[in-house]
Every structure is written in C-alpha cells, then in structure tokens.
Amino acid sequence: MALSAACGLPGTHALNLTPGKRAEHIRNILDQVFAHDTRGGINPLEGEFLIARLLESQPRCVAEIGTAAGVSTAIILKALDLLPHPKDFFAFEYLTYCYFAPEREPGYLVGLTYDELPSYYHPNWGIGSADMGKAMEGKGQIDFLLIDGNHSHPWATLDTICALPYLADNALLVYHDINLHLIGSERSKDEYGPHLLFYHFPGLEKITPGVSLPNIGAFRLDGSPQAALPHLLEVLYSHEWVPNSWPTLDLEAIKTPAEVIKKYLGVRQKAYLLEFMQAYLENRNTHMPTGA
Ligand SMILES: C[S@@+](CC[C@H](N)C(=O)[O-])C[C@H]1O[C@@H](n2cnc3c(N)ncnc32)[C@H](O)[C@@H]1O
C-alpha cells in the first residue's frame, strides 16, 4: 500500500467491538508491551487510554513526536493492527539513540514485541518535530498525533506548531505528561509545557482518564490546523519559557515554527516570534548562573 493511499482517506470499515472483546484486545496489547522493561514511557493506564482513542477514532495516518524506547510506539502499532483499513504510522525521535540506553536505537521495544515490523511503520530517528516535513511532505495528513517530547515550556507548543502543516482538519491530538509537574519528582517541577498547552488550548472537549491528576489527554482540533495557530501562539507567548530547555532553545529551534507562522499568518507574526526569541536569549544570558 502506497503511503499516500493510506493517509488522508476517510475510514470505510467500522470496527464493531463488543465491550468484552475490546477489553480483551486492550489487555492483550498491554500484556505484550508491559512484559518488557518499559522505563521512560507511558504507563498501562495511559496505554489503555491511547488504545481506546485509536480504536474509537480509527485513524489512517498516525504520528508520534518523542519515541525513546518506544512504549507508546509499540502500543500504537498493536492497536493499529486491529484496524482493518490501510494506515501509516510515522514515529519521530530527535535522538538517534534511546536517551537512557544509548547503546540501543529509539523504539527498540517495537523489535521486542514483533517478529516482523509492520509495513505501515515508518520510524524516523534523529528527526525532531522541526524536520518532520522530510518524512511527511506529500504523504497525506495526520489524523491522530501523539506529542510526548520535551516537557519544558514552550516545547510541546513548538512541536504542535511544527506539525500543523501535516495535520488533517479535526485531527485528534494526544498529549502525554499533562500533569507531570504535579505528580513527578522535584526534578519535574518545571515540566509543565504539555500542561499549559492541554489546559489552555480551547479544544472542544478535553478527554482524560478518570483519575484526579490525569497525565495523558486528548482533544480534537476545531476545524483546520491553521485555525489552531492563534490559540497556540497565545499559549506560546503567555507563559515564561523555561531557561536551559532541551533541545536548546535558540534561533535555529524556531526556524520551522517561524516558517509555519509566516505561511498561515504572514511575515509580521513571524517577525514577532523572532523578536520574542531575541528577548528570551538576552534575558537568559543576563540571568546565567555565575561560572556557567
Ligand atoms: C518521554 S520520552 C518519550 C517516551 C515514549 N513516548 C514512550 O512512551 O516510550 C521523550 C522523547 O522525546 C524526544 N524528543 C524531545 N524533543 C523532541 C522533538 N522536538 N522531536 C522529536 N523528539 C523529541 C526525546 O529525545 C525523548 O526521547
């Protein structure tokens, strides 16, 4: 199946699962993936949430930003296996290795849970959100996107802006770590980037697992990706950018977001982002810790 043939077509085969069968599929997937060391990835409750969204929305073109060992990656693939229609799944990881196991490649859990990799799986290692056009250009439109990259503001917002040109109208966006700063360790206290985006973006309906501090959530774009950009810029500029964020926040990091802004909103809005970045860099340098 050619990639472009799968991406962007409306679903034609409804997946009618009884609640019992659906629960069985979810349990099977979680059992297969969580039989392994799943450090650094989504947990079983979040996995269940992700599978449920995939089964109900039945996407044809799925992407993920932030793979690491590939817990979410393997879960997404196994849920997509259940969908009878053609599909594509693009995984993007900024690094060429797994950050906590540098001897292993990103997404290595997929290899541990499959004898043969699915033909619709398209891993892109060493390719961050800013460069996703290299894989997505001419390949159709993403109707389901998981964002699980860096958690310092403004990365989740920048990742989303970078993805806009490749999203379908009304795409479902899923964010991980939406409450990490509240439930994580002391080290995570500044990691509220996905939280700002998820709770401040005016999505029609925010879906989360039914727990008091959910750490994964989804909402559907209201119409075109272009219409989402002003809301994303509101989130981008209304909250302080975390100093010493990773990947490094510099003029290079905003090159792609700046082009997306120019494409949809014109050169003046692009210039505003560049000025904002200059001010951030000057302020960051002024506040550099002694000896840095
Ligand atoms: C929390 S881990 C992802 C975990 C993974 N989703 C799972 O469930 O196993 C975050 C990963 O995102 C990657 N990352 C950070 N910023 C990125 C970006 N802009 N584009 C792509 N990957 C990014 C990091 O290198 C890191 O490996």
Image (spheres, rainbow, N blue to C red):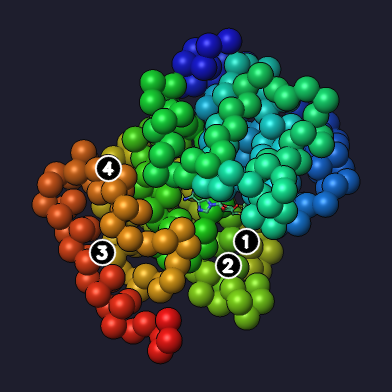
Whether residue 285 is visible, yes or no, is: yes
SS of the residue at dot 1? loop
Q: Earlier in the sequence, mark 3 or mark 1?
A: 1
Q: Name the residue under label 3.
A: 277
Quadrant of the drawing holding the C terminus: bottom left
Circles 4 and 2: CB atoms closer than 8 Å: no
Q: Which amino acid does label 3 sit on?
A: Met
Whether residue 70 is visible, yes or no, is: no
Q: Which amino acid does label 4 sit on?
A: Val
Q: Which of marks 3 and 4 is in front?
A: 3
| 140 relative to 44 in the view: left or right | left
Q: Which of marks 2 and 1 is nearer the N terminus?
A: 2
Mark number displayed over residue 260: 4
SS of the residue at dot 2? loop
User: 124 above or below 139?
Assistant: below
Residue sitting at 28 percent across and 70 percent down? Answer: 281
| 40 relative to 238 in the view: left or right | right
Circles 3 and 1: CB atoms closer than 8 Å: no
User: 68 above or below 117?
Assistant: below
Mark number displayed over residue 179: 2
How far apart, in angstroms, are the residues tagged by discs 3 and 1? 29 Å
